[in-house]
Amino acid sequence: MSVLNTAIYPKNVPPWERFVRIALSAVAASYGLFFLTAPWSWAVAASAVGFALTGLFGFCPACAMMGRRPVKKEAR
């Protein structure tokens, strides 16, 4: 059994949104680091990394607090 299938948290971000979160956070981090001045550059990059982690793990704590339900597993 895979570690991803036995995670201790339910995934509440669908696959298409996970891809969008990772792509947008890469754009935001590079914009923050290359076009903004400190300390704003570091703040934008750090928040983009946090946003990317929600995409990588498939779980967003803020969405869970707002009542977003877990994503239904696909039948194989």
Image: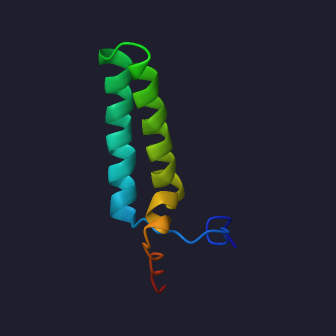
Residue 25 against residue 68 in the figure, above or below: above
Pick whichever, 62 or 6, lies toward us. Answer: 62
Decide if residue 31 is on the left or right side of residue 49. left
x, y (%) of residue 4? 62, 65
Residue shown at the point (48%, 80%) measured from the top left: 73
Which residue shows up at 36% across the image and 53% down it? 19
Vertical position of residue 71 compared to residue 24: above or below:
below
Q: Residue at x 45, y 81 (%)?
A: 72
Q: Is residue 53 above or below residue 30?
A: below
Residue 38 at x, y = what percent?
Answer: 42, 13
Image position of 3 with respect to 72: above or below: above
Q: Quadrant of the N terminus?
A: bottom right
Residue 40, given in percent of the width and then of the height, sits at: 39, 21
Residue at image x 40%, y 21%? Answer: 41
**Residue 31 in the image: x percent, y percent?**
31, 25
Q: Is residue 13 visible?
A: yes
Q: For the view shown, which residue lies furthest in the top direction?
A: 37
Residue 60 visible in this rendered orientation of the protein: no
Count of number-bearing discs: 0
Q: Among all residues in the image, which is located at the extreme front?
A: 66
